[in-house]
């Protein structure tokens, strides 16, 4: 992926090139590219005068940052205790099968990324799957096709506009 150097510099300039704004800058870069491209981190390092290894350290410390490209749609399966006992492992396996990727990966077409989390904190409605911030309560294997179809449909609808 080509990184727009001027765009990265403008995201940094938004915070007056201040080192203490590193996390906010990384959040803005990730919002723009759906991950943190190496070239963007190098530009950030040079502009803020922070060693690249320190920026990578911050980016790998926080789970919300990704050094790998993410899909347009983020699928997150809760694996907390309540969800686990209600079938979350089987739900995760079915998403892996339907998307043809292991947990932690992105589909080759860049449409979906699949992740699991230890707990989403909404145990009463588990098992829970979150897609693009939308919570799907009491998910079952039978609901997975309709969940995926909903987001594939959104893509088709958006392509037609």
Image (cartoon, rainbow, N blue to C red):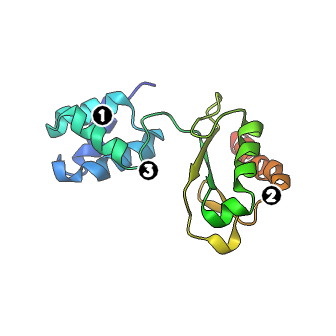
Q: Residue at coordinates 67% horizontally, 59% vertically from top-left? A: 84
Quadrant in the rendering for residue 121 = bottom right
Pointer 1: what residue?
41
Dot 3, how many residues are within 10 Å of its Cα: few (below 14), some (14-19), or many (20+)? few
Residue 121 seen in the current view: yes
Q: Residue at coordinates 18% horizontally, 34% vertically from top-left? A: 51
Residue 18 seen in the current view: no
Image x and y of residue 53, in percent = 24, 33
Work out which residue is located at the far bottom of the displayed protein and give it: 124
Q: Which structural element holds mark 2? A: loop
Q: Image quadrant for the C terminus?
A: top right
Image x and y of residue 17, in percent = 17, 46
Q: Is residue 18 left or right of residue 86?
A: left
Above or below, comparing residue 128 to residue 57 in the picture: below
Earlier along the polypeptide chain: callout 2 or callout 3? 3
Work out which residue is located at the far left of the displayed protein and give it: 49
Dot 2, how many residues are within 10 Å of its Cα: few (below 14), some (14-19), or many (20+)? some
Of residues 20 and 59, which is closer to you in this image? 59
How far is the residue under mark 2 from the one under mark 3?
A: 26 Å
Dot 1, how many residues are within 10 Å of its Cα: few (below 14), some (14-19), or many (20+)? many
Above or below, comparing residue 57 to residue 133 in the picture: above
Quadrant in the rendering for residue 94 = top right
Earlier along the polypeptide chain: callout 1 or callout 3? 1
Image x and y of residue 60, in percent = 36, 42
Residue 140's tag is: 2
Quadrant in the rendering for residue 12 = top left
Pointer 3: what residue?
64
Contact between labelled residues 1 and 2, with CB atoms less than 8 Å apart: no
Of residues 157 and 91, which is closer to you in this image? 91
């Amino acid at each position: 992926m080509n990184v727009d150097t001027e765009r990265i510099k403008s995201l940094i300039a938004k915070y007056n090139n201040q080192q203490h704004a590193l996390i906010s800058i990384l959040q803005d870069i990730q919002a723009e590219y759906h991950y943190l491209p190496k070239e963007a981190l190098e530009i950030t390092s040079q502009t803020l005068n922070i060693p690249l290894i320190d920026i990578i350290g911050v980016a790998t410390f926080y789970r919300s940052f990704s050094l790998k490209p993410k899909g347009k749609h983020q699928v997150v399966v809760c694996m907390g205790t309540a969800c686990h006992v209600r079938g979350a492992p089987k739900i995760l396996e079915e998403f892996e099968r339907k998307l043809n990727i292991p947990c932690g990966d992105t589909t080759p077409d860049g449409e979906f990324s699949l992740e699991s989390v230890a707990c989403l904190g909404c145990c009463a409605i588990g098992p829970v799957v979150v897609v693009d911030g939308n919570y799907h309560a009491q998910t079952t294997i039978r609901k997975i096709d309709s969940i995926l179809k909903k987001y594939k449909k959104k893509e088709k609808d958006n392509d037609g506009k």
